[in-house]
Amino acid sequence: MFSKRRGSNLLELATNRAIRELSHHPIDSEKYVRTLDSLVKLHKMKVDEKPSSVSMDNLIIVGANLLGILMVIHHERIQVVTSRAISLLLKPR
């Protein structure tokens, strides 16, 4: 139903293959060191692929919108809109 991006799946497969490859070589061998270097590079690619967090600009916009909504609600609580004032409002067409 929900599928990951294709690049992410390939990255996972390559990472798993590198981890399996590490178990077939002794720790002091050159092949182990090369595979470990490849694994570090794959991990870095995986970290770089993750989406960044929400930007500060978006947080400020959301906060300003919420503040505006709260100000309108507070004003409506204190100053009741009378029936005469409602008739002055523009009606959607």
Image: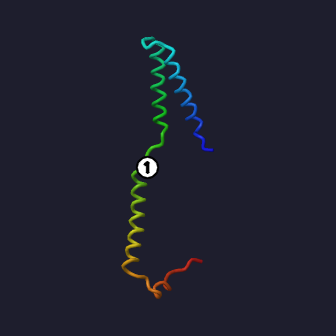
Nearer the observer, 2 or 69: 2
* Residue at horizontal 46 percent and vertical 12 percent from the top: 26
Query: Which quadrant is the N terminus positioned in?
Result: top right
How dense is the environment of label 1, judged by Cα within 10 Å: few (below 14), some, or many (20 and up)? few
- State the image coordinates of residue 51 (x, y, percent, origin top left): 48, 42
- Answer above or below: position of 77 versus 18: below
Residue under pointer 1: 54
Count of marks placed on residues:
1
Query: What residue appears at the point 45 percent right and 44 percent down from the top-left corner?
Result: 52
> Which color scheme is applied?
rainbow
Instruction: Give the image location of residue 58, x and y in percent.
Output: 43, 54
Q: Quadrant of the C terminus?
A: bottom right
Identify the residue at horizontal 47%, vertical 87% (top origin): 83
Q: Which of 2/49 is in front?
A: 2
Q: Position of residue 71 (x, y in %)?
A: 38, 71
Q: Amino acid at mark 1?
A: Val
The answer to which quarter of the image holds residue 14 is top right
Residue 86 lies, in percent from the top left, at: 48, 84
Q: Residue at x 60, y 36 (%)?
A: 6
